[in-house]
Image (cartoon, grey):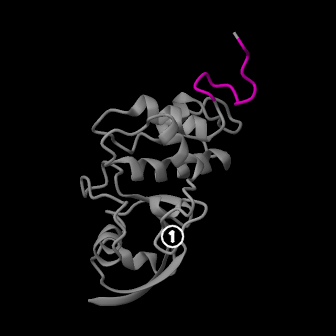
Amino acid sequence: MQREITVRVDGTARRLIVDTRTTLLDALRERLGITSPKKGCDHGQCGACTVLSGGRRVLACLTLAVTQDGAEVVTAEGLAPDADAAGQPIGGGLHPVQQAFVDCDALQCGYCTPGQVVSAVGALDELAMGWPSAVTESPGAPRPDRAEVAERMSGNLCRCAAYVNIVTAVLQAAGVSPTGRTVGQEVAG
């Protein structure tokens, strides 16, 4: 069965006619030519296809495209603050998480990087909203630290094992140094 849907992807409304069994990942990659979400495992276990839908992290390989009718979907291509209609940064501007990944050398082969970056953006939003994780220690709002970031990013696998630098990059984007102090509060030693 075919169904017409409209999905706002990276700020642009896109109309598609899709089979009701088509995943969001396949619609993005094969129908819209948006290739930053990767098809890693195609079973929801690697996180390479992570996108934001309505501001929340979703695995595009497990999400049916028809469920996204009217939704706002953001891929790694749409994170840059000043992007053109094709999602390409204008003037080299990067999202702070993207810049932190570059600064901290948090990528190697790059295959998982778009999903890692999108997941990091979602994880930082969850932290900002005060959502606890399995490792949140106190009843108050969770703080961005190595344990919180590692737990929240655990659904994204990296075959190159760049995890240490990925966690460091997410902390940098959160304004926290690898020592756990807020940037600007570092003590000279």
Relative vertical location of residue 169 with respect to residue 111 in this rendering, above or below: above
* Left/right of residue 106 with respect to residue 168 in the rendered view: left
Residue at image x 70%, y 30%? 182
* Residue at 63% from the left image edge and 40% from the top image edge: 174
> Residue 41: x percent and y percent?
24, 53
Q: Nearer the viewer, residue 185 or 3?
A: 185
The quarter of the rendered structure image containing the C terminus is top right
Residue 187 lies in the magenta-colored region: yes
Residue 92 visible? yes
Which residue is denoted by mark 1 in the rendering?
A: 10
Displayed quadrant of residue 92 = bottom right
Q: Is residue 150 visible?
A: no
Nearer to us in this view, 32 or 55: 32
Q: Residue furthest front?
A: 91
Q: Is residue 157 magenta?
A: no
Of 78 and 139, the residue lying toward us: 78
* Outermost residue, top side: 189
Residue at screen point 54% across, 41% down: 100
Q: Secondary structure at mark 1?
A: loop
- Segment tinted magenta in the rendering: 177-188
In the visual, does 175 lie left or right of 100? right
Q: Nearer the viewer, residue 97 or 88?
A: 88
> Is 124 located above or below residue 32 in the figure?
above
Tell me the residue at 61%/21% (across/down): 179
Report the number of numbered marks.
1
Indicate the quadrant containing the N terminus: top left, top right, bottom left or bottom right: bottom left
Residue 132, image x, y percentages: 60, 41
In the image, residue 61 sits, relative to residue 95, either above or below, namely: below
Magenta stretch: dominant secondary structure: loop
Give the amino acid at mark 1. Asp
> Within 10 Å of the Cα at label 1, are there few (<14), some (14-19), or many (20+) other Cα atoms?
many
Q: Is residue 184 left or right of residue 145?
A: right
